[in-house]
Structure formats: C-alpha cells, structure tokens
Amino acid sequence: MSGISRISTNTPWEPIVGYSRLVRAGDIVAVSGTTATDERGLIVGAGQMYVQARQALVNIRTALERAGLAMHHVIRTRMFVTDVGRFAEVARAHKEFFGDSPPASTIVEVRRLANPDMMIEIEADAYAGAASSRVSAPKPKAAVKAKAAVKPSAKSVKKPAPKKPSRRK
C-alpha cells in the first residue's frame, strides 16, 4: 500500500487537537494515544484502572480492524498511567489482548491525562507488511554448555599500580 491513510473516531479531542486515531503509511501503522471512551466519546470506568485499560485496548483493536489489521500486527505499545502502583491491573488487561503475540512495550507514570477521570492512555504501533503473520519466530536452540572457566594464576593477574598521594598547594 502506498500513500497515507487516516482513520478518525468520534472522540471529542480529535477535531480540537487536530489528530487522527490511526495513520497508516505503507506498512507502518500508528495508533494515537487511546483512552477509555465509549462509542459516544464518553469516558468509562471512572476509578477502575483495569476497566479503563481494557476499554482503551478495545478502542485500539477497533481502529486496527477498520484499517484491515488485528492486534497481532501490533509491534509496540506505550502505556501512560496516572498510578503505576496499579500496574497489575494494566498488565492483566494488556496480556488478555497480547498474550499470544506480545509486542515490545513501555509503561510510564504521568501526573495526569487530558481529563481527570482518565487513568490510562495507550499508543500502539503496528506492522502491516506481508511478513507480519501470527506465526512466532522459531525458539532459540538451547545454549551449548560452556567449558569450565580457567582461573587465572596468581602470576598472570596484574595488580593495579599504587596511587601516589595527592599534594595540595
């Protein structure tokens, strides 16, 4: 696919800020920071980190599907949370969506998001090329057992030269 295509949704911030939910440039796909909004653009799950994380991921999946992609095409996520102490809730939701094809991922705590009721915002990058399939890369072969390390003899070990005392003027 050549050129750039954009997909927008009905969140109230897109026309105000001037951004698209998803931009596809050839095989590279970027999904903007996505929060826990419903189909009307209203925030869901106030005070519930897991619910908000899950809704944000549903919204990402919906945008990807509109572009003809799926969650297994995602190669990277970035999660911005207002309380990293609730990491387990975020991790649970993320694993539900990416357990079979985990992307590279980052989680960062921020002071706040665009609306005080928002607890999480998630970005996703995807690859739509022919090589992006659900098949995982082959597992690495077991490491060859290394021979026992040879301990250096006392004669072969160089000792550092003693430091000269510093003189102050």
Image: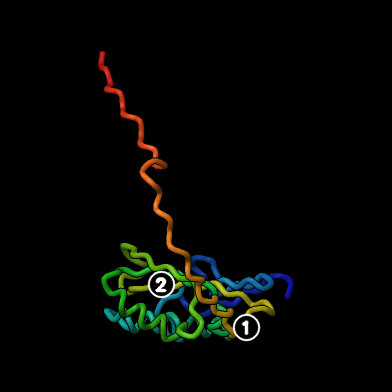
- Position above or below: 58 against 104: below
Q: Can residue 17 be seen in this view?
A: yes
Q: Nearer the viewer, mark 1 or mark 2?
A: 1
Q: Residue at x 53, y 79 (%)?
A: 9
Q: Which of 75 and 123 is in front in this view?
A: 75
- Label 2, secondary structure: give it: strand
Q: Which residue is drawn at 39% across and 83% down?
A: 54
Q: Which of 35 and 98 is in front in this view?
A: 98
Q: Which colour scheme is used?
A: rainbow
Point out residue 79 in the picture as x, y percentages from the top left corner: 41, 70
> From the viewer's perspective, is 159 left or right of 142?
left
- Label 1, secondary structure: give it: loop
| Crowd class of label 2 (few under 14; some 14 to 19; many from 20; radius 10 Å) | many
Type of amino acid under label 2: Glu
Kindly identify which residue carries mark 1.
Answer: 133
Which image quadrant: the N terminus? bottom right
- Which labelled disc corresponds to residue 121? 2
> From the viewer's perspective, is 48 left or right of 63?
left
Disc 1 and disc 2 in contact, CB within 8 angstroms: no
Q: Is residue 114 visible?
A: no
Whole-angstrom CA distance, mark 1 to mark 2, is 26 Å
Q: Which of 69 and 111 is in front in this view?
A: 69
Point out residue 157 in the picture as x, y percentages from the top left corner: 39, 42
Q: Nearer the viewer, residue 135 or 143?
A: 143
> From the viewer's perspective, is 142 left or right of 107?
right
Q: In which quarter of the image is residue 131?
A: bottom right
Type of amino acid under label 1: Ser
